[in-house]
Amino acid sequence: MDTRFLLREQAKAGVRRALGRFDLGLVRSPFDAQVVRAANWLGVTDVLDVGANIGQYATALFAAGFDGGVTSCEPLSDAFARLQKRAARRATWRTTQTAVGSEPGTATINVSANSYSSSIRTVNATHLEADAASRIVATESVSVTTVDRLVDDYGLDPATTLLKIDTQGFESDVLDGAARTLTRFAAVQLEMSFVPLYEEQALFPQLDDRLASSGFHLFAMSPGLSDRRTGRQLQADVLYVAADRLPASR
């Protein structure tokens, strides 16, 4: 893993923790605090963190005041070791070394220089132009499980669980593996792309339609990766809430 990436992520986590204690942020309404407010309103007690990398997402939620449980899934051996070390500080934070997809088995993951862009799919030229550190530097064979199986294995109640998916172009496959449980989750958060960044990935329109047809309503959004040359928005973090949890329109 790139040492500069690790130091940067550790520094960002420290800043989030410090600001979170005082309900402050680098912007007026930081997205992680918005997600925690939504989780509290929905009665969410657990988060299933698919694509955890070294634990940035869970760290941000805890810093923003989330006091429930987190189950983090990360397939890369180096990232998982760092995730496991970070999670050991919290009794309510569980980790498992696995990828998540449409069915149990094994897969080959492409390891990116920056670690967090690693994917079972192959990064394309558009992504490389926007972020050279997304380049592939190695491959690794990983175990794969499904959301449905994780729910069973960890005794999660989807009705009080937020499903978070950040799998770099592999989101559709993760949803395929939640055929039995998807419609029962209180909320789903995904990192979604507006333009192809990985080969054969599903984009925002397809994923948005799929979640809408599964009974979810787009609830909040935060900009993600953009093209530094043109300013074009490439990705966003998007939070969906089960439509039957929303108050009736007035």
Image (spheres, rainbow, N blue to C red):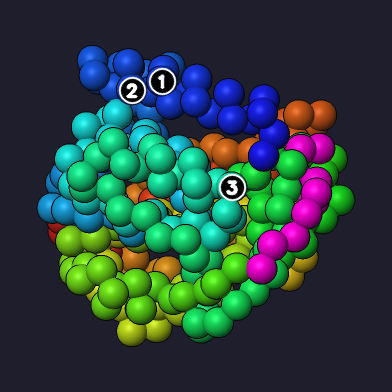
In the image: residue 129, left or right of residue 184: right
In the image: residue 75, left or right of residue 249: right
The quarter of the picture where the N terminus appears is top right
- Residue ID at (65%, 44%): 115
Q: CA distance from mark 2 to mark 3?
A: 23 Å
Name the N-terminal-most of marks 2 and 3. 2
- Residue ID at (43%, 26%): 13
Compared to 12, does 40 lie above or below?
A: below
According to the picture, the residue beneath numbered tag 2 turns out to be 17
- Which one is closest to the eye, mark 1 or mark 3? 3
Q: Is residue 25 magenta?
A: no
Residue kind at label 1, given as amino acid type: Gly
Residue 94 drawn at (x, y percent): 30, 53
Residue 203 drawn at (x, y percent): 63, 62
According to the picture, the residue beneath numbered tag 1 turns out to be 14
In the image: residue 175, left or right of residue 46: right
* Residue nearest the observer in this picture, 23 or 56: 56
Q: Is residue 179 in view?
A: yes
Magenta extent: 132-141
The answer to whether marks 1 and 2 mark residues whose Cβ atoms lie closer than 8 Å is yes
According to the picture, the residue beneath numbered tag 3 turns out to be 78
- Residue ID at (53%, 66%): 99
Label 2, secondary structure: give it. Answer: helix
Residue kind at label 3, given as amino acid type: Asp
Image quadrant in which you'd find residue 24: top left
Label 1, secondary structure: give it. Answer: helix
Label 3, secondary structure: give it. Answer: helix
Q: CA distance from mark 1 to mark 2?
A: 5 Å
